[in-house]
Image (cartoon, helix red, strand yellow):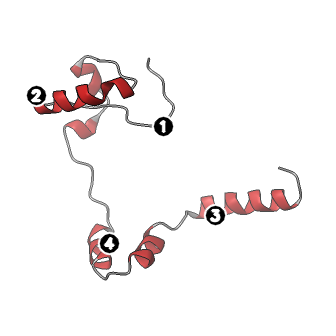
Amino acid sequence: MNKKDDKGLSLIFVHSSKGKDLLNLISKKLAMEEIDFDEAVKHNKSYYSSVEMPKKRNQFLIDIDSGDFGKVVKKYTKPTLKCRFKNLVKKILRKCHLR
């Protein structure tokens, strides 16, 4: 299998019989392969340590409590300068019928 398409989950750890039962329930709808545990965690540092807390997390939680969800989404999901530039170039090319 080993298909890398960036369109889904890459690794599932099952730690209990209940987890195994749940995975078995949905396994027919998934493309899965069982791999060795050591191989699975070799390049997966998140198994052994938590991800770093985002710098804006506390402010986000304060903002989300304000009740204006749409405003919070806009504030925290602004596209990067690179992304905005890329979109601008695409828009110009479309107008010029070059794309």
| Quadrant containing the N terminus in the rendered view | top left
Q: Which residue is mark 1?
A: 7
The amino acid sitting under disc 3 is Arg
Mark earlier in primary sequence (1, 2): 1
Q: Residues within 10 Å of mark 3 (few under 14, many from 20)?
A: few
Mark earlier in primary sequence (2, 3): 2
The amino acid sitting under disc 4 is Phe
Q: Which residue is mark 2?
A: 17
Q: Position of residue 46 (x, y in %)?
A: 26, 40
Which type of secondary structure does the marked residue at label 2 adopt?
Answer: helix
Judged left or right of residue 60, residue 84 is right
Q: Which residue is mark 3?
A: 84
Which numbered mark, 2 or 3, is in the foreground of this view? 2
- Label 1 to label 3, Cα distance in Å? 23 Å
Mark earlier in primary sequence (4, 1): 1
Q: Which residue is mark 4?
A: 60
Which numbered mark, 1 or 2, is in the foreground of this view? 2
Q: Residues within 10 Å of mark 2 (few under 14, many from 20)?
A: few
Q: Which mark is residue 45?
A: none
Question: Between residues 46 and 65, which one lies in front from this camera angle?
Answer: 65
Residue for point 37% across, 32% down: 10
Mark earlier in primary sequence (3, 4): 4
Q: In which quarter of the view is residue 67 placed?
A: bottom left
Mark earlier in primary sequence (2, 4): 2
- Label 3 to label 4, Cα distance in Å? 23 Å
Is residue 6 visible to the viewer in this orientation of the structure?
A: yes
- The answer to whether the residues at label 2 and label 3 have Cβ atoms under 8 Å apart is no
Question: Between residues 34 and 41, which one lies in front from this camera angle?
Answer: 34
Residue for point 27% across, 54% down: 52
